[in-house]
Image: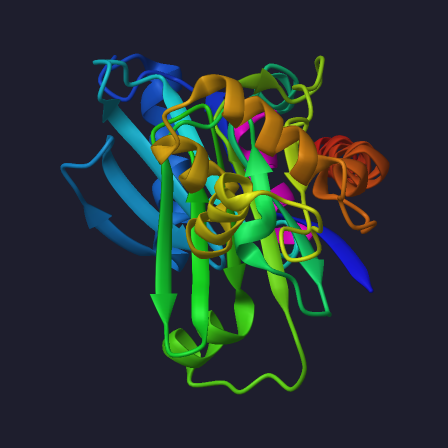
Amino acid sequence: MVKASIDKMSIIFDCPSFSSGGKFAVKFWESFRKCILNRSSYERTDMFYKYNATYNDIFISWGMNEHGVDDKMRLEFNPSKTKVFDIISVIVFIGQNSLLSARVTRLDFAVDYDFELSAVSFYDKFKRKCQIICGDTGVQTIYLGAKSSDVQIRIYDKRVQLKEEFNTVHDGSWWRVESQDQRPFSLFGELNKNPFQNLFYVDIFDIEGLDDFEMLFVTVAAKLGVNGALSIVRDRNNRQVKLARVLSRRIQIETPEEVYRKNFEPLITKLKEKLNDGSICKLH
């Protein structure tokens, strides 16, 4: 079985300047303190924003940010776990106009497989940076692309994460392929292109009739992944031949690209409708 979810979302809203001193701004931030901060765990920080607070499962940032701007408020939450009512409560406070002009600055989309996959068999032809983390069970995590990239792909054994972070044992297989998409877009505007559009899953263990050099490439790919093998093979002509041979023998799974194409727009549309309808009802 394959499941899809939006795992994390960051949205930036317009709000009154924190340091303006105007009557409306003073009233806004005083109400924010009473309605939100009094129910939150609050801290001052030197991170991207001057202040942070956690309201239920929503991480809120405001004040002077890294660009010297203090008329923005950032919400970060997991749409799969955070109650829509809590999100609406904050958005209603900020105002409906801010919702309509909101910009999504990060969106993590997760594709979960409940059967065994070979993590090293995932390949993104445009990702130059590849990091592989191994453990007792073999390859446990692969990062394609840098964390600071517009899009980073993570492939990891969810069972290992649950065990290490929560001491929870999950029966059966659970592999997650997750995109961290930091390309900004308007919440009610045009969506970004599919972050998995260049990601392929290839069966590097089911290839016959290879010469010694080709077999070496496949052996290295089995250890380092296709991206890793390509990074150390120096004959560029042979790179294309080996890759073509590997890709021609792809096993048939529902790829992350296909899962995203089928599920992302309905998921984000449903979330936007709930936020918009809920905010309008509360504002009136």
Q: Is residue 39 left or right of residue 94?
A: left
The quadrant the N terminus occupies is: bottom right
Q: Is residue 191 left or right of residue 146?
A: right
How many numbered marks have been drawn onto this rendered protein structure?
0
The outermost residue toward the left is: 46
Q: Is residue 113 visible?
A: yes
Give the magenta part as a residue range.
Answer: 84-95
Examine the residues drawn in magenta and state their main secondary structure.
helix
Residue drawn at (60%, 58%) of the image? 176
Q: Is residue 197 left or right of residue 128?
A: right
Q: Is residue 108 visible?
A: no
Residue 179 image-quadrant placement? top right
Residue drawn at (47%, 25%) of the image? 12
Give x and y (percent) for residue 160. Answer: 46, 74
Residue 44 image-quadrant placement? top left
Give x and y (percent) for residue 276. Answer: 75, 31
Q: Nearer the viewer, residue 122 or 100?
A: 122
The quadrant the C terminus occupies is: top right
Residue drawn at (51%, 18%) of the image? 237
Give x and y (percent) for residue 190. Answer: 71, 13
Q: Nearer the viewer, residue 30 or 178?
A: 178
Whether residue 272 is in magenta: the answer is no
Residue drawn at (70%, 47%) of the image? 209
The scheme the figure's colours follow is: rainbow
Give x and y (percent) for residue 93. Answer: 54, 35
Instruction: Relative to 281, say whether 204 is above or below.
Output: below
Q: Nearer the viewer, residue 162 or 53?
A: 162
